[in-house]
């Protein structure tokens, strides 16, 4: 199959690249799938990678393990390039919750410290911090207004005992995209560190952690990265590596990882120290395949396409009588659009859409769509028809 890329000049990709992307998504044969903020479908090549792993595991056993390990190492490289990090700053994890917990449980808290987050964060970006209350750590949950974040209120919630500010790049319910540079500025001005739950933006929105100085970042791969569940990425700025108490320490956490008779707690000087034991090889190999596909296009082009599709969706929804609740200003819009249909039973509308081959979500009392770059205008028209 032809690589999914185009000449690296200053021109935007034409419709051909999106048609080719669409051909690699088997889901399009049946569904208008507009729910990537929940669980994404797998691209055909990613499905094939998982099947190939299973066939090799059945036929060859662990004789092919070194090759799997080499390919997984390549996923760290891809992940680092995706966000402008160093490979040594990337650990491969199971999910976003695990990445948050590595910081929440590993940070050197003192009684009286606090964490500042948003009141409408996904539960996984609240419970790990709230779970620190028995150590005297307060979790301050800053209210939002209809999904919109007031950065001044976030700043006002911080003080000299704030150790971590933890926010999502993109709100899972409203689609609000936070200004990460401003968030980093707020945290660092008070001597705190910034944790970013990046699951609703990673892979489809550009980010360079050298320009935007987030300290920690985590994202599972099963949403916009088009990977399977159980395989994700954790970033820790290298200067913070020794600040966290390492969790999940095992045979793979040490520099002599394959010398099982040599017992010495000499931790790896990289984020790999958090990869303590055997990994989800099938999931990680599949995630690498999906990430290669997306990297062949680039987050800048993908975000532009997603904005184009979601802008179209908003226009058509409003024409159909919907009320858009997501902020669609250029600095805050994302791939998520939340909307209302006044006077309609929204859960029933969602069920109706499923019956008509359209997949969307009901979140926070609103309907939510989250198209990817392979979606097209026909998917949007099918959705509008399904809402009638």
Image (spheres, rainbow, N blue to C red):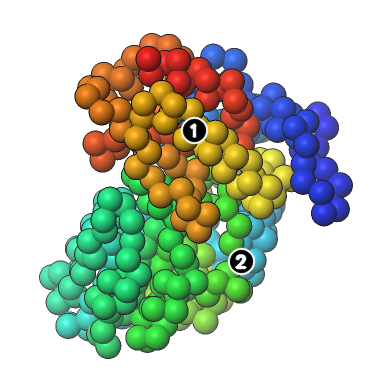
Q: Is residue 86 left or right of residue 166?
A: right
Q: Is residue 228 in sight in this rendering? A: no
Q: x and y percent of residue 17 in the render?
A: 75, 34
At mark 1, the secondary structure is helix
Q: x and y percent of residue 194 in the render?
A: 41, 72
The residue sitting at 61% across, 57% down in the picture is 206
Quadrant location, the C terminus: top left
Residue 138: image quadrant is bottom left
Return the residue nearer the eye: 364 or 199: 364
Q: Is residue 176 left or right of residue 4?
A: left
At mark 2, the secondary structure is loop
Q: Which mark is residue 315?
A: 1
Q: CA distance from mark 2 to mark 1?
A: 31 Å
Q: Is residue 17 in sight in this rendering? A: yes
Q: Which mark is residue 208?
A: 2
The residue sitting at 67% across, 61% down in the picture is 81
Return the residue nearer the eye: 179 or 104: 179
Give the crowd class for mark 1: few <14, some 14-19, many >=20 residues within 10 Å: few
């Amino acid at each position: 199959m032809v690589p999914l890329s185009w000449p690296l000049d200053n021109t935007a990709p034409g419709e051909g690249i999106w048609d080719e992307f669409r051909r690699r998504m088997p889901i399009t044969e049946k569904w208008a799938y507009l729910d990537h903020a929940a669980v994404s479908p797998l691209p055909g090549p990613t499905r094939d990678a998982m099947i190939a792993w299973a066939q090799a595991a059945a036929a060859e056993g662990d004789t092919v393990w070194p090759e799997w390990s080499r390919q997984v190492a390549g996923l760290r490289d891809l992940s680092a390039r995706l966000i402008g990090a160093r490979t040594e700053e990337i650990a491969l994890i199971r999910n976003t919750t695990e990445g948050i917990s590595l910081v929440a449980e590993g940070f050197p808290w003192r009684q009286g410290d606090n964490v500042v987050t948003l009141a409408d964060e996904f539960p996984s970006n609240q419970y790990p911090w709230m779970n620190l209350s028995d150590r005297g750590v307060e979790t301050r949950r800053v209210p939002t207004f209809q999904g919109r974040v007031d950065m001044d209120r976030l700043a006002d919630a911080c003080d000299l005992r704030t150790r971590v500010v933890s926010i999502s790049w993109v709100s899972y319910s409203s689609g609000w995209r936070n200004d990460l540079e401003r968030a980093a500025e707020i945290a660092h001005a008070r001597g705190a560190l910034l944790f970013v739950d990046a699951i609703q933006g990673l892979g489809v929105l550009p980010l360079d952690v050298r320009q935007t100085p987030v300290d920690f970042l985590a994202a599972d791969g099963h949403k916009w990265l088009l990977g399977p569940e159980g395989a994700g990425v954790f970033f820790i700025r290298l200067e913070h590596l020794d600040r966290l108490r390492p969790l999940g320490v095992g045979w793979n956490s040490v520099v002599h990882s394959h010398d099982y008779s040599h017992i010495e707690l000499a931790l790896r000087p990289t984020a790999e120290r958090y990869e303590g034991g055997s990994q989800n090889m099938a999931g990680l190999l599949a995630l690498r395949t999906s990430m290669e596909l997306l990297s062949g296009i680039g987050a800048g082009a993908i975000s532009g396409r997603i904005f184009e599709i979601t802008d179209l969706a908003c226009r058509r929804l409003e024409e159909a009588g919907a009320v858009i609740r997501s902020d669609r200003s250029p600095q805050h819009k994302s791939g998520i659009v939340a909307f209302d249909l006044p006077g309609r039973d929204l859960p029933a509308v969602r069920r109706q859409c499923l019956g008509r081959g359209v997949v969307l979500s009901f979140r926070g009392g609103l309907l939510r769509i989250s198209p990817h770059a392979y979606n097209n205008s026909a998917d949007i028209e099918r959705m509008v028809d399904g809402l009638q």
